[in-house]
Amino acid sequence: MSASNPLVRVEPLAAQFAAAAHDWALRLGLPQELDGAEFALQIGEGGLQLLMLEAQAPGPVRVDFVEGAAAHRRQFGGGSGQMIAKAVGIQPGVRPRVLDATAGLGRDAFVLATLGCEVSLIERQPLIAALLEDGLSRAAVDAEVGAIAARMTLLRGNAIELMKQWQGEAPQVIYLDPMFPHRDKSALVKKEMRLFRPFVGDDMDAPALLAAALELASHRVVVKRPRKAPAIEGAKPGYSLDGKSSRYDIYPKKKLQG
Ligand SMILES: C[S@@+](CC[C@H](N)C(=O)[O-])C[C@H]1O[C@@H](n2cnc3c(N)ncnc32)[C@H](O)[C@@H]1O
């Protein structure tokens, strides 16, 4: 399935957010009044959130690095023993510079930044990038997670192009998690998939993304896949790490050293 162009309107949740709603509408080129809108991008006390406007739709989605699931994983998620940490090559004394070229809501990038990696994030879907920017700016002013957010830099645009034009030092590790048709079915992921699939589609250009990443990364490329999914078409992974619902395909280029 490819991305469609859903109808979205921007709305404040209270009068004091009217100016912020106006600014987001301008920045994203979205209307504030729209009959038949399928989604609302709402601005309120908790920041920016995306809501599906349909009976029995799941609740709104926002990026929250301070509380909820991200905070829980930060405190109890297993630290550098987590599979994603092993996949990107975190070891004692080694915290690679990572480019997460498919940022989405930034959860994986936040885990890596929590573990001490400097992470650049690329997101091409403007609405998802907006949610991420908003979550990062709230995290930046939090006493506990501010230092983690400071290790995360958001870039917007198509990662294939941005990687081809990359200036300066190459990222040591490039992390990819493109949309895949049959992803894990946890309630949280299902809710977000229902909301985001109309905007994002299935990332059919993943083979070009992998090729550009392999060209740029100095040390390795890591691709997250649903456990049973085939590898991305193109170069074959050197090895894989299997998790409960995900698999990490590793494309090594050079040994990471402390
Ligand atoms: C499955 S989500 C990533 C979820 C993310 N790992 C997380 O932890 O929240 C895939 C995201 O990658 C983005 N994406 C896919 N291909 C891209 C590309 N070539 N350039 C930039 N973003 C891309 C999609 O818009 C989507 O938001």
Image (cartoon, grey):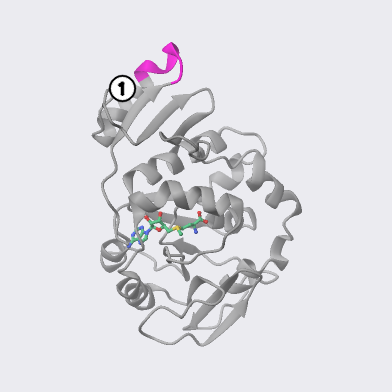
Q: Nearer the viewer, residue 190 or 203?
A: 190
Give percent across and percent down for residue 43. 44, 26
Residue 105 seen from this side = no
Q: Secondary structure at mark 1?
A: helix
Segment colored magenta: 13-19
Rendered-image quadrant of the C terminus: bottom right
Q: Looking at the image, is 56 positioned above or below residue 257?
A: above
The residue at 39%/40% (across/down) is: 130
Give percent across and percent down for residue 94. 63, 69
Quadrant of the rendered structure where residue 103 is?
bottom left
> Residue 84 magenta-drawn?
no
The residue at 57%/40% (across/down) is: 64
Horizontal placement of 220 versus 127: left or right? Answer: right
Horizontal placement of 215 versus 184: left or right? Answer: left
The residue at 55%/45% (across/down) is: 149
Residue sitting at the far top = 15
Q: Looking at the image, is 100 positioned above or below residue 15?
A: below
Look at mark 1 in the image and give the residue it sits on.
Answer: 22
Give percent across and percent down for residue 245. 61, 68
Horizontal placement of 23 versus 104: left or right? Answer: left
Residue 116 seen from this side = yes
Q: Nearer the viewer, residue 59 or 243?
A: 59
- Ligand 1: does it lie within 8 Å of the C-beta at label 1? no
Which amino acid type is marked by label 1? His
Give percent across and percent down for residue 156. 33, 50
**Within 10 angstroms of label 1, few (less than 14), some, or many (20 or more) residues?**
some
Q: Looking at the image, is 240 positioned above or below residue 108?
A: below
